[in-house]
Amino acid sequence: MDAASQIIGAHRVTAAANDRQQLAPMVAQIKPNTGRQARELSSDAGSSSEANFRELNRRHIRGYVATGRQQHGHALYLGIVVHETHGT
């Protein structure tokens, strides 16, 4: 979805158990559908795979992809755990 105009750039319906094989075809639809390539993309953990990360990198798309469940109070960014601190 385009944040400014609230337009969905691509969609796909599948009966697959997870989304790992769906990210690349979805990304490929964005430019033909909208006339421009996405700069950022967010997805749930179902799309988390090295192949999908490579595809996003190849297309110069900043991906915000969940890599799994997180412990409360921790932020995870591309495999790096950042612990929140509350005053020191």
Image: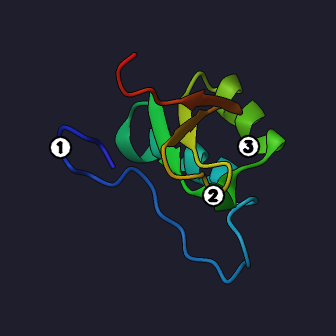
Discs 3/1, front? 3
- Residue position marked by numbered label 3 in the rendering: 52
Proximity of marks 3 and 2: CB atoms separated by less than 8 Å: no
- Identified by mark 1, the residue type is Ser
Which secondary structure lies at badge 1?
Answer: loop
Q: Within 10 angstroms of label 2, few (less than 14), some, or many (20 or more) residues?
A: few
Q: Which dot marks residue 20?
A: none
Q: Which residue is mark 2?
A: 69
- Residue highlighted by disc 1: 5
Determine the residue positioned at 17% across, 43% down: 5
Q: Amino acid at mark 2?
A: Arg
- Place of residue 63 in the rendered image (x, y in percent of width and height, measured from the top left): 56, 35
Q: In this rendered view, identify the residue nearer to me: 34 or 52.
A: 52
Horizontal and vertical percent for residue 86?
37, 28
Residue 55 can be seen in this image: yes
- Residue at 55% x, 30% y is 83
User: Is 1 placed left or right of 77 in the picture?
Assistant: left
Q: Position of residue 53 (x, y in %)?
A: 72, 36
Q: CA distance from mark 2 to mark 1?
A: 31 Å
